[in-house]
Image: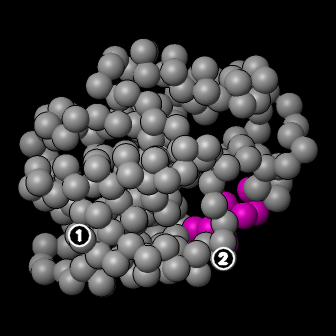
Amino acid sequence: MELEKGYFITFEGADGCGKTTQAELLEKWLNTKGYNTLMTLEPGATDLGKNLRQILLHYDKPVSDEAEMFMYLADRAQHAQMIIKPALEDKKIVLCDRYTDSTVAYQGYGREGNIEQINILNKIATKGLKSNLTLLFDVESEIAQSRLGKTKDRLESQGIDFHKKVRNGYLELAKQEPERIKVINANKTIEEVFSEVKKIIGELLNI
C-alpha cells in the first residue's frame, strides 16, 4: 500500500523500556497490511554511525559530556541525510529506534546540559527533519534497569538517579509536544503495550 508521502515514526524511552521490541512488532504488522517500511536506529545505522556507536556505548575511558553529545549529533546528521530522508522521499514509513528526543532527554536532562543549545544543534544536524509521530514508552526507572540484565553498556551503567532524570525529561517533552509525542505505559506486558501501539497507528493510518 503506497502512501501519498513518507511518514516518520520514532520510538523513544529509557534503556529497558521495550521500544526496540515494539518497533519490530510494528514493522511486521505494517508489512502484513501492505505498507512499505524501513526500520532503522540511532546510533549506528550508517557505516560512520557503527564506528561512533562502538565508541559511544563501549569506550572505557572518560568522555566529556560535550564530546558525547557531538558524537550523537554526528551520527544523526549522517543518518538523516543518507538513510531517513531518501526513505521518506520513497514514500516509506520510517520506523526509527531513537532520534532527536534521545539527545534532549539523555544529554539535556540526564547530563543537565543546555537544552536550548541541544535543540538548535539537533535542528542543524537534521536540517530541520522532525518525526511525524513519536511513541514514548514510559516505564519506572527501577523496572527498566532490572530488564537490562548484568551486561550493560556505558550509558546503561549510569546510576539510577541519572535514569530518573532521563525519564522525567522524556515526560516533560511529551507535555511540551502532546500532538507529536504519545506516551505509552510500558510497565505492562509486551502484548498489552503492542495493543496500544496498534491502536495509535491504526487511528493514524485508518487501518
Label 1 amino acid? Arg
Specify the quadrant of the image occupied by residue 191: top left
Q: Count neighbours of disc 1 (C-alpha within 10 A) and say few if under 14, some if 14 to 19, many if 20 or more.
A: some
User: Is the residue 82 above or below the residue 36 in the image?
Assistant: below
- 61 relative to 89 in the view: left or right: left
Please tell me which residue lies in front, 32 or 188. Answer: 188
Please tell me which residue lies in front, 162 or 26. Answer: 162
Magenta residue check for 83: yes
Q: Secondary structure at mark 1?
A: loop
Q: Residue 179, can we see it?
A: yes
Residue 17 marker: none
Magenta residue check for 25: no
Give the image location of residue 35, x and y in percent: 77, 32
- 92 relative to 197 in the view: left or right: right
Label 2 amino acid? Lys
Give the image location of residue 49, x and y in percent: 46, 70
Give the image location of residue 72, x and y in percent: 41, 72
* Residue indicated by mark 1: 111
Specify the quadrant of the image occupied by residue 203: top right
Give the image location of residue 39, x and y in percent: 59, 46
Q: Which residue shows up at 46% across the image and 47% down it?
A: 174
User: Is the residue 33 above or below the residue 107 in the image?
Assistant: above
Q: Residue 54, can we see it?
A: no
User: In the rendered structure, which segment of residues is drawn in magenta?
Assistant: 78-87
* Residue indicated by mark 2: 127
In terms of sequence position, does the residue under pointer 1 or pointer 2 come before the other? 1
Q: Which residue shows up at 63% across the image and 54% down it?
A: 131
> What secondary structure characterizes most of the magenta part?
helix
Specify the quadrant of the image occupied by residue 67: bottom left
User: Is the residue 92 above or below the residue 142 in the image?
Assistant: below
Question: Residues under labels 1 and 2: Cα distance?
Answer: 24 Å
Tell me the quarter of the image containing the N terminus.
top right
